[in-house]
Image: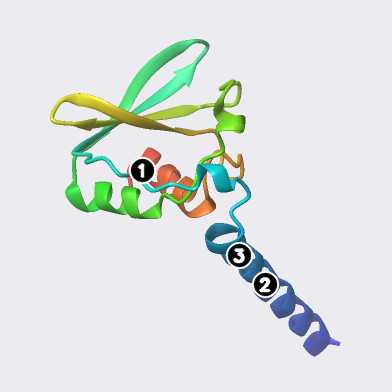
Amino acid sequence: MKKIFLGGLILIAVLFLALAFWVEFVACPFPDYRVNIDHPIDRLEIWKITDDEKELIRTVESPAKIGKYIRKYRWENVNAICCMEDTRYIFEEYASGESVGSSYYAQPFARYNNLGFTLYQLWLILGL
């Protein structure tokens, strides 16, 4: 009985991982918004949104972390972020002191962006 239960758990885990991989890299649910970050970034500012106020919680200037931020990005769902009702954090992207873009974060499965990018945003929010 334990072998069947363990086998079932392994099968569910494998199916979940396969589905996550497919959604992340293959079946972009928003093909019109499948783009790469094509502008240089040398600084990220992470702003917390609370009751129509913005509070700067962190600035990221590490080239390694910014490079990973750029590489993790696959797509964004502009239909989800157009109204911003669930947005909890804004990532402002800067190059040479000028704002060049932004990304948004609500929660890990908010579908604003691809899952890998969203989880990396959470990593940066937590300061890890």
Furthest toward the left, the residue is 96
- In primary-sequence order, the first of circles 1 and 2 is 2
For the residues labelled 1 and 2, the Cα–Cα distance comes to 26 Å
* Circles 2 and 3 in contact, beta carbons < 8 Å: no
Q: Return the residue nearer the eye: 108 or 115.
A: 115
Q: Which residue is mark 2?
A: 13
Mark 2 vs mark 3: in front = 3
Tag 3, which secondary structure?
Answer: helix
The residue beneath circle 1 is 124
Q: Relative to 5, is 58 above or below?
A: above
Q: Position of residue 61 (x, y in %)?
A: 19, 39
- Amino acid beneath label 2: Ala
Of the two numbered discs 2 and 3 on the same chain, state the one appearing first in sequence: 2
Three-letter code for the amino acid on which mark 3 is drawn? Trp
The reply, left or right, for residue 113 in relation to residue 10 is left
Residue 96 location (% of width, % of height): 13, 30
- Rate crowding at label 2 as few (under 14), some (14 to 19) or many (20 or more) other CA atoms within 10 Å: few
> What number of labels is visible?
3
Task: Give coordinates of residue 104: x percent, y percent.
Answer: 46, 32
Horizontal placement of 74 versus 60: left or right? Answer: right
Residue at screen point 49% across, 16% down: 50
The secondary element bearing badge 1 is classed as helix
Q: Amino acid at mark 1?
A: Leu
Which x, y percent locates residue 4? Answer: 82, 86
| Left or right of 80 in this view: 47 | left
| Relative depth, front residue between 79 and 105 | 79
Which residue is rendered at x = 42% and y = 24% of the image?
48
- Measured in 3D between alpha carbons, the distance from the residue under mark 2 to the one under mark 3, in whole angstroms, is 14 Å
Q: Which residue is mark 3?
A: 22
* Dot 3 or dot 1, earlier in sequence: 3
